[in-house]
Amino acid sequence: MVSQEELLNTAILTRLSYFNLNTMVELYRQLGSATAIVEHRHDLPTVVPGLSPKVVEALRDVETMRHRAEEELEYDEKHGIRVLCLNDAEYPQRLRECPDAPLMLFYKGTADLNARRIINVVGTRHATAYGKDLIRKFVADLRTLCPGIVIVSGLAYGIDVCAHRQALANHIETIGVLAHGLDDLYPPHHRDVANEMVCHGGLLTEFMTHTNADKLNFVRRNRITAGISDACILVESAAKGGGLITTRISKDYNRDVFAFPGPVGAPYSEGCNQLIRDNGAGLITSAEDFVKAMGWDDDTRIQAARQAGIARNLFPDLSPDEQKIVELLRKTNDLQLNIISVKTALPIGSVSSLLFNLEMKGIVKPYAGGTYHLIQ
C-alpha cells in the first residue's frame, strides 16, 4: 500500500509537473518514487546528470505546494475518491507504460482499471442519428460477444455520452475520463449519467479539484482515454476533431484503432473515411468485425468451457503464437501485456486473447499489477 507521505509528495509533483510531465515521469521512474525526488531535489543535477533546468527550478517550489496537496488528499478521502500513484498496483497498467502517463490519478467508481478488455469509443460532439444507431447496435452486440468488457469515453456531448448511455443500458461498465477535477462536472447536463456511472463504471481524471475544464485539458485527457484502452473506436468525426486526436495518440501507444465508415460527403463521416483511406484505422461495420479483428472471438467458447469444468488436458498443444509467448516468459518471467506484445511483435488484442487461453490451460497466471507469470 502506498504511504501517505508518497501520496502527498506525488500530489506535489503533479502540481509542479504540468508543463514538464514527460521529464518528471522519467525522473520518477529512475528514482522509483515521488518521495525520493523530493528528498533529492537539492542535488538532483548530480544524481541525474543532464536534468532539465526547468525541472530543477520547479522543484524549488515543493514546500509552497504542500498545503494545497494536503487539502486535496483530505477532500479525496472525505468524498470517497481513490488516489492512485504511478507505482500503485491498482494504477492502470496499460497507461503506466506510456511515456507521458500521469503521476497521479483520481478515481471514483467500481470498474477495474485493469480489466481484461477495455476499449474507448470516441467521436464528434454532433452525433447524427446514423452514429447513434451504430453505437446502439455495436454496444448491444458487444455484451453478447465479449462479456466483461469495459467501455471508456470522455462524457462529452454526442458520441461520448451516447456510448456511456448505451453501455449502462446494456449493463456494461463504463468509465468517463474528465478534463477537470472530481469536484465538478462538465457538461453539467450529464450529471445523471455521471452519477449512474459511479455505481456501474467510474469517473477518472488526472486533475485535482478546482481545475477548470480548459481547452488544453481536453487534449491532455485524450491520452488517458487512449492509454488505458486496448483499442480505440472512432464513430463519426469531422475532418478535424478531438476523436482524431485520440486515434493518433492510440497509434502512438501501439493500440489498435478502428473506425466506422460513413456516407461519402457527410460532414461527420469525413474524419472516419479519411482515416480508413489513409490506413490509420481498420474498417469495421459491426461488433463482430471488431471482436474478430482483436482476436477476442473465442472468448465465449473458453468461458463456456470454464463453466463446464473442462479439464486443461483438452488443450494439450500450443499454437505457434502461444509458444512464442511461453518462450518469452521462460526467458523473462512476469511481464505486462503491452511488453509481451512489443517483444513478440503480436497485436495487443491477440496477445490478450492468447494469454487468456494459456491461463485456461494452466500455463500462465495473472498477478496484481497486470503482469503474467509462467507457472510451467
Image: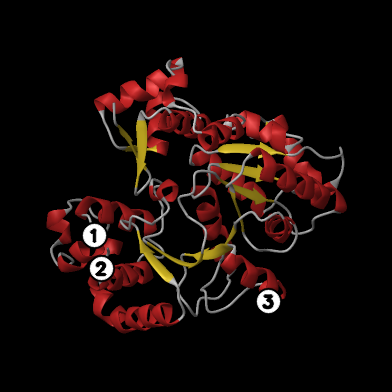
Instruction: Name the N-terminal-most of marks 2 and 1.
Output: 2
Q: Are marks 3 and 1 in contact (CB under 8 Å)?
A: no
25 or 342, which lies in front?
A: 342
Residue 298 against residue 131 in the figure, above or below: above
Mark 2 residue type: Glu
**Secondary structure under badge 1?**
loop
Q: Are marks 2 and 1 in contact (CB under 8 Å)?
A: yes
Which residue is at a point 44% across and 31% down the rendered structure image? 360
Q: Quadrant of the N terminus?
A: bottom left
Residue labelled with disc 2: 6
Where residue 149 appears, x then y in whole percent? Answer: 58, 47
Residue labelled with disc 3: 188
Mark 1 residue type: Ser
Cα separation between marks 2 and 1: 7 Å
Instruction: Name the N-terminal-most of marks 3 and 1.
Output: 1
Residue 217 falls in which quadrant of the image?
A: bottom right
Would residue 136 be found to the left or right of residue 369 on screen?
right
Cα separation between marks 3 and 1: 36 Å
Where residue 134 appears, x then y in whole percent? Answer: 79, 45
Label 2 crowd bin: few (<14), some (14–19), many (20+), radius 10 Å: some
Residue labelled with disc 1: 33
Where residue 288 appears, x then y in whole percent? Answer: 71, 33
Q: Are marks 2 and 3 in contact (CB under 8 Å)?
A: no
Residue 331 falls in which quadrant of the image?
A: top left
Which residue is at a point 53% across and 59% down the rendered structure image? 221
Mark 3 residue type: Pro
Residue 83 against residue 95 in the figure, above or below: below
Would residue 173 be found to the left or right of residue 354 on screen?
right
235 or 19, which lies in front?
A: 235
